[in-house]
Structure formats: C-alpha cells, structure tokens
Image (cartoon, rainbow, N blue to C red):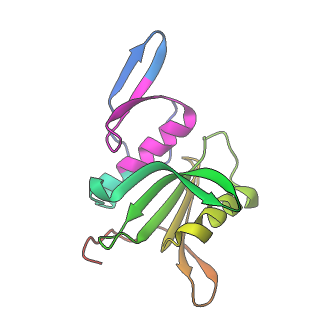
Amino acid sequence: MEKLNFPKFDFLFKSKENKSYIFDPVRKKWLALTPEEWVRQHCIQFLLKIKKVPIGFIQVEKKISFNNLVKRYDLIVFKPDQSIYLLIECKSPYVKLTQKTFDQIARYNLVLNSDYLMLTNGFIHFFCRMDYKKGQYLLLFDLPQYNSKQ
C-alpha cells in the first residue's frame, strides 16, 4: 500500500493464502487490507496517537438507518456522555472527494448529529465543525485535540 498523507504509524500485518491483512486495534481482529481499510486504519491511528482519543470512545463500521435505507459509517468518536463528537468517512485513495462524497457524510450526520466531520481519501482531508444554530458547516484546517472531559 502506498504512503498516505498521515504521520508514519506502526501497523500489524499478516499474509494468508496470498492475501494481506491488517490488525484493527478497535475491533480487535484481522481485516483484509483493501485501499479503504488502509485509510481507515490510518484514521484510527491518527485518532489514537495524534488526537489522543481513548480507544473505548472509537466505534468502527456500524449500521445506521435513514430514509428507509441501511448504511454503514466508517468511524465515530464519542464524548463521555455518549453523544457524538466526530464522524469520519473514509474513501479509497483512488476515490476523488467531491460534493457527492461530502453529501454522503452530511446525510449520515442528519441522523448522528456529530460536532465535527472528517472526510478523507488518505491524501486529502476535509475537517469541519457543525454550527447547528446557523445550519452551517465551518471548515477547519485540522481537528481540535480530543478532550475526554468535555
């Protein structure tokens, strides 16, 4: 897998029957190393190592329902009160980030009501803070450091 626009992180890999796997520390299991999983695992390490999110506050790939559709979000970071601090949508490095990809995370957030959003393909990262009073997305250069006392 190619180098992404994240700091260098250490990962656990294994190979079985000519397939590569990466260990997910949140789900505590080995997963097929796809391009999207490569991005997702970098996001997990970014949350753990850079933003100092406790591992117990991260949830990976869970189902949500909206408009009679069942979808899966990539990553959520919870606050201690179990409200949602951050919603992350990960795309393969080969997927261009467009209005359509942003609309996907925005639809998920209609249900989840996260404080912050992150959209990434591993090379380009978009961060925003939600202003629900004004109904706006406020673009950011980075996410704030996580504070488990919020």
Residue 143, visible in the rendered structure: no
- Is residue 117 part of the magenta span, yes or no? no
Q: Residue at the location (51% across, 57% down)?
A: 88
In the rendered view, tell whether residue 114 sits above or below residue 3: below
Residue in front for this viewpoint, 145 or 76: 76
Residue in front for this viewpoint, 128 or 76: 76
Residue 115 place in picture, x, y as percent: 48, 74
Q: Residue at the location (35% across, 32% down)?
A: 29
Residue at the far top in the pictured view = 17
Q: Quadrant of residue 30?
A: top left
Q: Residue at the location (63% across, 82% down)?
A: 136
What residue span does the magenta drawing correspond to? 21-45
In the rendered view, tell whether residue 128 sits above or below residue 89: below
Residue 139 place in picture, x, y as percent: 58, 74
Residue 89 place in picture, x, y as percent: 56, 54
- Is residue 43 part of the magenta span, yes or no? yes
Residue at the far bottom in the pictured view = 133
Residue 126, visible in the rendered structure: yes
